[in-house]
Image: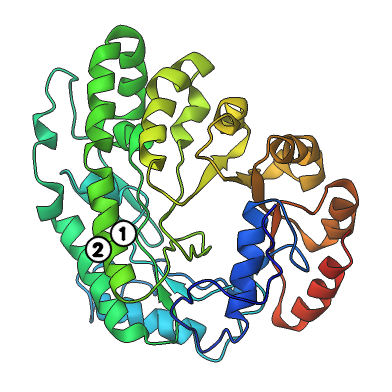
């Protein structure tokens, strides 16, 4: 196994004023991918994981519409910078500004309009029939959504200095993109009635993915920054991607293996690190197939709400992921931390913990005892 405790460091990434411990944090993360532990498992404090959400309520004296507020790059950067001012970022917690127009921005690169709410955006389907894909004929690089994300990215890179990193936006090709274009119900009916036409839509969803990803990746790399996005886990070498298929929670294993997984494989190629976002038990029905993919390096487990808590009920699933040779990132409530550490091996676990500033040092001491 590689020795992650060596004192020599790989090529340094762009420094952060708030992270004098950046090198050892990066080495903890790299050890985590290999199911090894440098000195303790990596920890992210989620309360201090600054990110851009919608921002202030609509001020009609400043913005005529919510769309104007979402598109106000200067305001978004001012708000983000104010949110991190004076904060400490302990353990594997990093300040990252992610240019953001919501979860369906990749779909909007090809046409259609985003609808803007206070804290999220939505996308109305533009494919009325699988016989006509002409609404997708536009150049994604010339779309208003693409140009706005590029503007936000360049503006943030010009301002961030050593204060924070800039991430690439939330990119969802594959099944979730196709469901946005066609409407989930119509897409699923098509899997049974017109499967070859659905495959054509899926093909379109990944056709330009690497060109789009690489465009934004080059902007970050040219600025000396790591590959990072909303998950706030930086990749020091190469490219980092978060494959996902939330719509797969509603389809069978057979359809998942035909209409989702082959296209996800194509997304993951050329990426140095892929962390698959498994959003709840519906997506977890496909977990064995996801774990069998060699390009999946880790799983982000999102257990849902309500009856899906407490976390301890998912200990068998977590151990299953680790036994498959994949690392895992997950949220653990502080009141379940000791039982969790007693039940689950520490190798390959990245903890996301919701703790106030006054508790962080104590929490790290608790994690340090995990053996």
User: From the viewer's perspective, is 233 left or right of 264?
Assistant: right
In this rendering, the answer to whether 67 lies above or below 339 is below
Residue at (22, 65) in percent of width and height: 150
What secondary structure is found at the residue carrying circle 1? loop
**How far from the left and from the top, in percent, is residue 90?**
66, 79
**How far from the left and from the top, in percent, is residue 169?**
34, 59
Residue 221 circle label: none
The mark closer to the camera, 1 or 2, is 2
What secondary structure is found at the residue carrying circle 2? helix
**How far from the left and from the top, in percent, is residue 80?**
42, 79
Residue at (10, 46) in percent of width and height: 139
Question: 230 or 219: nearer the eye?
Answer: 219
Residue 101 circle label: 1
User: From the viewer's perspective, is 247 left or right of 345?
Assistant: left
Question: 204 or 81: nearer the eye?
Answer: 204
- Please report contact status of discs 1 and 2: CB closer than 8 Å, yes or no: yes
Residue matched to label 2 = 149
User: From the viewer's perspective, is 311 left or right of 262?
Assistant: right
Quarter-of-image position of residue 282: top right
Residue 278 at least partly seen: yes
Residue at (79, 35) in percent of width and height: 316
Question: 239 or 179: nearer the eye?
Answer: 239
Location of the C terminus (image quadrant): bottom right
Residue 45 at least partly seen: no
User: From the viewer's perspective, is 8 left or right of 313?
Assistant: left
């Amino acid at each position: 196994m590689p020795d992650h405790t060596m004192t020599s460091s790989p090529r340094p990434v762009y420094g952060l004023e708030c992270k004098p411990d950046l090198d050892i944090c990066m080495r903890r993360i790299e050890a985590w991918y290999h199911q090894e532990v440098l000195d303790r498992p990596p920890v992210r404090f989620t309360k201090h994981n600054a990110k851009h959400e919608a921002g202030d309520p609509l001020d009609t004296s400043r913005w005529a519409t919510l769309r104007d507020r979402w598109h106000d790059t200067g305001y978004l950067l001012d708000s983000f910078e104010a949110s991190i001012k004076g904060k400490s970022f302990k353990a594997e917690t990093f300040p990252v500004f992610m240019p953001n127009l919501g979860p369906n921005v990749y779909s909007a690169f090809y046409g259609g309009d985003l609808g803007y709410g206070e804290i999220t955006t939505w996308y109305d389907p533009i494919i009325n029939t699988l016989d006509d894909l002409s609404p997708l004929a536009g150049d994604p690089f010339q779309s208003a959504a693409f140009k706005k994300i590029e503007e936000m990215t360049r503006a943030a890179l010009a301002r961030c200095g050593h204060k924070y990193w800039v991430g690439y936006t939330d990119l969802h090709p594959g099944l979730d993109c196709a469901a946005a274009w066609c409407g989930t119900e119509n897409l699923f009916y098509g899997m049974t009635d017109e499967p070859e036409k659905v495959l054509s839509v899926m093909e379109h969803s990944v056709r330009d993915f690497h060109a789009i990803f690489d465009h934004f990746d080059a902007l970050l790399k040219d600025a000396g920054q790591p590959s990072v996005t909303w998950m706030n886990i930086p990749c020091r070498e190469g490219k980092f991607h978060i494959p996902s298929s939330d719509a797969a929670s509603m389809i069978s294993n057979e359809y998942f293996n035909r209409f989702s997984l082959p296209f996800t494989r194509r997304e993951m190629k050329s990426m140095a690190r892929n962390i698959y976002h498994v959003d709840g038990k519906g997506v977890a029905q496909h977990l064995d197939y996801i774990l069998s993919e060699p390009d999946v390096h880790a799983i982000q487990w999102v257990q849902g709400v309500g009856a899906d808590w407490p976390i301890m009920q998912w200990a068998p699933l977590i151990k299953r992921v680790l036994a498959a040779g994949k690392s895992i990132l997950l949220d653990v409530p502080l009141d379940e931390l000791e039982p969790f550490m007693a039940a689950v091996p520490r190798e390959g676990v990245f903890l996301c913990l919701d703790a106030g500033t006054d508790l962080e040092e104590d929490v790290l001491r608790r994690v340090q005892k995990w053996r």
